[in-house]
Image (cartoon, grey):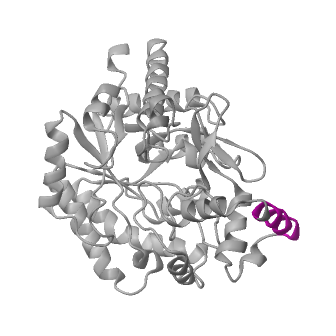
């Protein structure tokens, strides 16, 4: 039986030819699959077969395989169901078809309004000298109240929170204020949009009349428009949870917990409508029982991000080492292995679920490099992959 226990497909996020982490580096780390996107194509435009093949050949020629798209971005007009959203959905479906025709059939995406994943500090320093990503709610509030000066911001916070944020803001240097602003609005790696302060204020206004209920309806409309098509071409769509999974800057969140998933899958039950199970994003709020969420939707897990965060009771968190923090990685990987065994025995083709180590610490020689994608340095993710691989090996060995 031990010989028939499938292992996770070990993948690595690569940002294309300009990524300081090369495909050769990735091979040396032991990953066999690549998670990639065509970031050079403007959001909403069709990914042509020629552009997909051009990127795929680079990956294939390195001895690796392009296993997952992350992300095929969803245009803001689709999220707000405004303007040319119908045309943009048609474009999205054409990109799905073009990817499928090239043999790439796992597509990760998100439905987060305006902002993609958000952190306030890209260089939180640990005692061992390594750096990590951090989300500080006081910094986010200070940005909202005193840098962005969002019109309705005062209504979203208590007097105590506002006063705390004012004191925090006044303690910052101009450089520190500028860093917080840029970290939030200019886009972290993988984000498809970056903004100036003025353009950011304008796009926030497009959500003035869209609450979480309306955004959920817009998500379901989008899914009903694409999932039958996904099934017909053999594509697995896997929505990434909100990161962080709570409202920011007055924007609604709709993929943050078990109840959100239940609503989405009740409305669009086809199994091609699945999830990217991200332990780090979901694990940021204590109410999310990761094991319970995985068990409930394990048949729909098409892609996995394994990372851990350490949270407090004030909404703050930082990226912990992969086997530390608040995520019980042993428990989660045990459940993944059991799900893969179930799929294998049921003769499902997707029994090797693609997984990537997410958000490693910047450490060792990466601290001396001039160009490093925050959260996506080589050595920190290598450490994470090695720890995950070892844990998986030990669990399988003992079954």
Q: Residue 18: horizontal and vertical position, in percent?
A: 29, 49
Q: Residue 173: horizontal and vertical position, in percent?
A: 70, 60
Magenta: main secondary structure:
helix
Residue 330 part of the magenta-drawn span? no
Q: Residue 102: horizontal and vertical position, in percent?
A: 15, 52
Q: Residue at x 63, y 60 (%)?
A: 175
Q: Which residue is at the front of the view, 232 or 112?
A: 112
Q: Is residue 220 left or right of residue 350?
A: right
> Picture quarter containing residue 353?
top left
Q: Which residues are magenta?
A: 158-169
Q: Which residue is at the front of the view, 173 or 131?
A: 173
Query: Which residue sits furthest right?
Result: 160
The relative height of residue 77 versus residue 304 in the rendered view (above or below) is below
Q: Residue at x 64, y 66 (%)?
A: 248
Query: Which residue sits furthest bottom?
Result: 83
Visible residue check, residue 1: no
| Picture mark count | 0
Q: Residue at x 30, y 49 (%)?
A: 36
Q: Which residue is at the front of the view, 79 or 206?
A: 206
> Picture quarter containing residue 50?
bottom left
The relative height of residue 108 versus residue 23 in the rendered view (above or below) is below
> Picture quarter containing residue 292?
top right
Residue 168 part of the magenta-drawn span? yes
Q: Quadrant of the N terminus?
A: top left
Q: Is residue 149 left or right of residue 157?
A: left
The relative height of residue 202 versus residue 366 in the rendered view (above or below) is below
Visible residue check, residue 103: yes
Q: Residue 397: horizontal and vertical position, in percent?
A: 44, 12
Q: Which residue is at the front of the view, 175 or 238?
A: 175
């Amino acid at each position: 039986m031990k010989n028939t226990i499938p292992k996770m497909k070990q993948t690595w996020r690569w940002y294309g030819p300009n990524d300081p982490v090369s495909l050769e580096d990735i091979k040396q780390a032991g990953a066999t699959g690549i998670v990639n996107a065509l970031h050079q194509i403007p959001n909403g435009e069709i990914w042509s077969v020629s552009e997909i093949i051009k990127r795929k050949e680079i990956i294939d020629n390195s001895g690796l395989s392009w296993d997952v798209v992350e992300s095929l971005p969803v245009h803001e007009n689709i999220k707000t169901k405004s303007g040319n959203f119908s045309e943009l959905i048609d474009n999205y479906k054409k990109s799905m078809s073009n990817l499928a025709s090239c043999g790439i059939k796992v597509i990760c995406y998100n439905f987060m309004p305006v902002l993609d994943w958000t952190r306030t500090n890209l260089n939180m320093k640990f005692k061992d000298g390594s750096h990590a990503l951090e989300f500080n709610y006081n910094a986010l509030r200070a940005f909202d109240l005193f840098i962005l000066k969002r019109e309705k911001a005062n209504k979203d916070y208590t007097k105590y929170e506002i006063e705390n944020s004012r004191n925090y803001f006044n303690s910052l240097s101009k450089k520190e204020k500028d860093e917080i602003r840029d970290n939030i609005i200019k886009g972290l790696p993988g984000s498809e949009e970056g903004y100036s302060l003025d353009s950011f204020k304008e796009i926030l206004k497009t959500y003035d009349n869209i609450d979480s209920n309306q955004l959920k309806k817009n998500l379901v409309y989008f899914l009903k428009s694409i999932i039958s098509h996904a099934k017909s071409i053999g594509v697995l769509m896997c929505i990434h949870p909100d990161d962080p999974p709570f409202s920011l800057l007055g924007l609604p969140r709709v993929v943050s917990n078990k109840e959100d998933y239940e609503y989405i899958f009740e409305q669009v039950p086809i199994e091609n409508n699945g999830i990217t199970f991200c332990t780090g994003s979901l694990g940021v709020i204590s109410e999310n029982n990761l094991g319970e969420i995985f068990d409930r939707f394990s048949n729909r897990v098409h892609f996995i991000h394994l990372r851990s965060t350490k949270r407090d009771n004030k909404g703050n968190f930082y990226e912990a080492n992969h086997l530390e923090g608040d995520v019980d990685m042993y428990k989660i990987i045990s459940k993944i292995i059991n799900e893969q065994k179930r799929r294998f025995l049921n003769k499902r083709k997707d029994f090797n679920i693609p997984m990537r180590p997410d958000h490693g610490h910047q450490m060792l020689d990466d601290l001396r490099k001039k160009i490093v994608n925050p959260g996506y340095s080589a050595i920190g993710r290598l450490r994470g992959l090695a720890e995950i691989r070892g844990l998986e090996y030990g669990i399988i060995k003992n079954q």
